[in-house]
Amino acid sequence: QVQLVESGGGLVQPGGSLKLSCAASGSIFSVNTMGWYRQAPGKQRELVARITSVASTKYVDSVKGRFTISRDNAKNTVYLQMNNLIPEDTAVYYCYADIWPVVGPRDDYWGQGTQVTVSS
């Protein structure tokens, strides 16, 4: 069974930094695109950043220049380095991965979510 486990959220002051991690584990044949979504209270979930298996990246405009997504293919892990955080970044952050398991169909898998709060 495949699962994604996130870590790294927390409370930070405006202008601060956090780094989120998300590791995929289980019976995995291949991991394709990985990424991060976020959902703030009263708002729809939005794609923050994604990275393909060949390290092509995409960011939502509001985080360009402040967030960096990266991955370690050997560890099936995706990271989100968040710098110069602002209160509008406050949300629950969810990682996802497009995974082909050893047994079963290719599918999107999701982490449990981690809270990021930016406040003074």
Image (spheres, grey):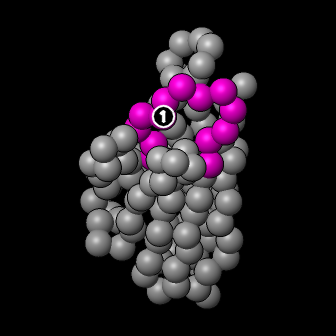
Does any portion of residue 36 appear in the rendered image? no
In the rendered view of the protein, which quadrant contains the N terminus? Answer: top right
Does 94 appear above or below 19? Answer: above
Residue 111 in percent (x, y) is at 64, 43
Left or right relative to 68: residue 28: right
Residue 75 in percent (x, y) is at 57, 49
Residue at the outermost top position: 104
The quadrant in which residue 61 appears is bottom left
Magenta segment, which residues?
23-35
Of 1 and 40, which appears nearest the observer?
1
Residue at image point 54% right, 13% down: 105
Residue at image point 44% right, 77% down: 83
Residue at image point 66% right, 53% down: 6
Does 19 appear above or below 74? Answer: below
| Dominant secondary structure, magenta | strand
In the rendered view of the protein, which quadrant contains the C terminus? Answer: bottom right
Left or right relative to 15: residue 115: right
Count of residue discs:
1
Left or right relative to 28: residue 47: left
Residue 68 in percent (x, y) is at 38, 65
Three-letter code, disc 1: Val
Is residue 91 covered in magenta?
Answer: no
Residue at image point 58% right, 22% down: 101
Look at the numbered disc 1 and give the secondary structure of its residue. Answer: strand
Residue 82 in percent (x, y) is at 47, 71
Which class describes the residues within 10 Å of circle 1: few (<14), some (14-19), or many (20+)? some
Residue marked by disc 1: 31
